[in-house]
Structure formats: structure tokens, C-alpha cells
Image (cartoon, rainbow, N blue to C red):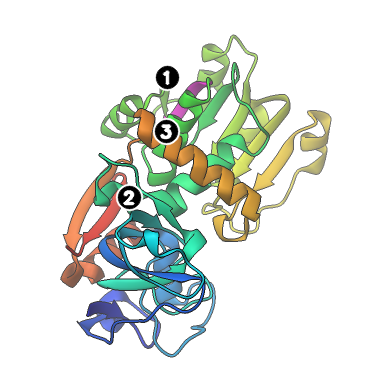
Amino acid sequence: MRAAWYERQGAPEDVLQVGSLDVPEPAAGEVRVRIHASGVNRSDTYGRSGRQAPMAFARIIPHQDGSGVVDAVGQGVPTDRVGQRVWVYEATWNRPGGSAAEYTVVPARRAIRLPDGIDFDAGACLGIPAMTAHRAVFADESVTGQTVLVTGGAGAVGSAAIQLACWGGARVLATVSSGAKAQVARDAGADETINYRTEDVVDAIKRLTDSAGVDRIVDVDFGGNLSTTIQALKPDGVVASYATRGDPEPKIPFRSLMVKNLTVRAILVYTMSEAAKTAASQDITRTLESGALRPVIGQRLRLDDIAQAHTDVERGSVVGNTVLQLA
């Protein structure tokens, strides 16, 4: 099979290789998927660069998320899964073989039915982005009637969070950094957008909420946004954050959080409970089928362009998801 891989960590153009590898066989409890599209997420670039941890395997085929068709099953997996269109997630979580290849094997529970009418490119954007967004929006049950602020509303996670929060019955505000990104957020369903480069975010939120503040924040930068978060949230509000880029080790102003009885939720999709993952996959299926969720795709490339894809994702130069097409 054609695949991309790396055997050492470093810059994408230095370590990523594209060539031919043996087709993997599914073990007991696994399915093999003929990959049609592979999603490229920021955490995939962290694994390749060595930013967060050394390599756990001698050779790694990158990318957690993908989509395709089940073509073989291991022992204990119903044979009627062969031929099923699926989206896969966590393909390289404690495993060496991800979706940047024509075939990958994953535990059967990590291959979720892709509804009819949803193309493979969209299916490759449902693991890290949509599942993270779901947890950030719904970790504390219903958001019906709430006001939810999504920071980075044009991003892969942010745009999914806007759509899911709207589906859940919330009023949604979103921060963006340009007029073009504001349009992406509005197209996703945001009721209001705030350009944090040209507006005071706290003042804008006070204006848009009659000084009440927001009930929940889905946050792309916990450390960088912490001061704004505390001012923007209502008493008993929640911030659910999945990254901290501006300040990776922020000083926590505990008393400010305590006075307003605020809740901080840190989210990493890989270590979510199985119950949370199941709830997310079920709701993602429902929203895909109803049309409430449509991943924003900003770039489609081929497998040979994987180094460029990693570079673009690291730079944040693409609005929305980046997908590699393999079929």
C-alpha cells in the first residue's frame, strides 16, 4: 500500500516519507479500513515534531482521523461490517499505524458508521475536531437556552462547536481575527461575531448580553484568554478548554474563579471516558444525518503533499480542516 511515515522526529520536510509498505492485517477485535481521506490535526504535527513526547514506535504512520470503507475484520467482529462506510478516530493513539495510508487497522469501536450522503472528506474531520467540540459543548449536559462563547470560531474545533451548540439550542457568540473568519463563523451558525483584533472582547460581550455575560466558553487558548474568560463568564459559568497556546503554564487566579463559582474543564479527546466518546459519536451521527453538522474544510491535498499539509496546519494558515485524499 502507499503510505506516509516517519522514523525520526523533526520538521515535516525532513522526516516525512511517502512510499510503499505492507498492508496491515486486522487482529482480534479490529477492522481494516481502506482509507479514502485522512484528516490532519495539530496534534498529529506534535507527534511528528517531538513537541510533546518522544516516538513510541520505530516507525509511525501519522494521523488519528480518517474515513473509508471496512474491507476486512478480525476475529470477533461481525462480518457484516465489511463494506461499511466509516469514519475512524484515534488510529495512532498508542498505536503505530494511522490514516495517512491506503489501509489502516483500528479497534472496531473506533470505526463509526458514516451516514449516507456524507462524503469521505467530511468524514475525515470528525475525530479530534468534532469529538473535542462535542465534549466542550455538552460535558455538563444541555445548553438549551444558554449563551455560549466559542473562541476561535473559524477553526476546525471552533466551527464544529458553533454548529453543535446551535443544534443544542444555545445562542452562540464567536471570536475571530478577520472579516473572512467572521463569515466562516456566521456560516456555521454563530449569532454574533467579535473581532478580537479590533474590538474589546469583554466590552462586546457585555453589550451583546446586556452585561449578563455568557454561560459557557468553548476555548482555544486557556492561558492566553484567561483574564477575558473570568470577566466574560456569568457566575456559575463554565470554561471548557482544549488548548493553551498563549501561556502553556498559566498562573491560576483562584480567588477570581472562586468568587464567581466558575468551573474549568480541560479536554483531551484521547483520554475522555468511553461513555463520553460514545455520546459524542452518537450525537455526531445525528447531526450529520439532520444536516446540523457540516465540517468546514479549508484545504484538500494528496498524500504526496503531506509535508505541506503539516506545515500549513502548524502555521495555522488554513481556515478549517485540512484533508489528504487517498482515493
Which numbered disc, 2 or 1, marks the residue that appears first in the sequence? 2
Instruction: Specify the farthest residue to the top.
Output: 210
Q: Is residue 217 visible?
A: yes
Please tell me which residue lies in front, 152 or 115.
115
Find residue 281 and report its horizontal and vertical position in percent. Answer: 50, 46
Marks 2 and 1, how far apart at CA: 28 Å
Marks 3 and 2, how far apart at CA: 13 Å
Question: Residue at position x 25%, y 39% from top?
Answer: 117
Question: Residue at position x 42%, y 18% from top?
Answer: 191
Find residue 76 and report its horizontal and vertical position in percent. Answer: 51, 71
Q: Is residue 197 above or below residue 221?
A: above
Q: Is residue 113 above or below residue 196?
A: below
What amino acid is labelled 3 in the image?
A: Thr
Which circle marks residue 123 in the picture? 2
Q: Which residue is mark 1?
A: 192
Question: Residue at position x 62%, y 41% from top?
Answer: 240
Around disc 1, counting alpha carbons within 10 Å, would you say few (fewer than 14), some (14 to 19), or many (20 or more)? Answer: some
Around disc 2, counting alpha carbons within 10 Å, would you say few (fewer than 14), some (14 to 19), or many (20 or more)? Answer: many
Which circle marks residue 287 in the picture? 3
Discs 1/3, front: 3
> Could you say which quadrant of the image residue 270 lies in?
bottom right
| 174 within the magenta span | yes
In this picture, which residue range is highlighted in magenta? 170-176
Please tell me which residue lies in front, 9 or 74.
74
Q: Quadrant of the N terminus?
A: bottom left
Question: Residue at position x 30%, y 26% from top?
Answer: 187
Please tell me which residue lies in front, 3 or 217.
3
> Could you say which quadrant of the image residue 116 lies in?
top left
Considering the numbered disc 1 on the image, is that residue within a helix, a strand or a loop? strand
Magenta portion: prevailing SS class:
strand
What amino acid is labelled 1 in the image?
A: Glu
Considering the numbered disc 3 on the image, is that residue within a helix, a strand or a loop? helix
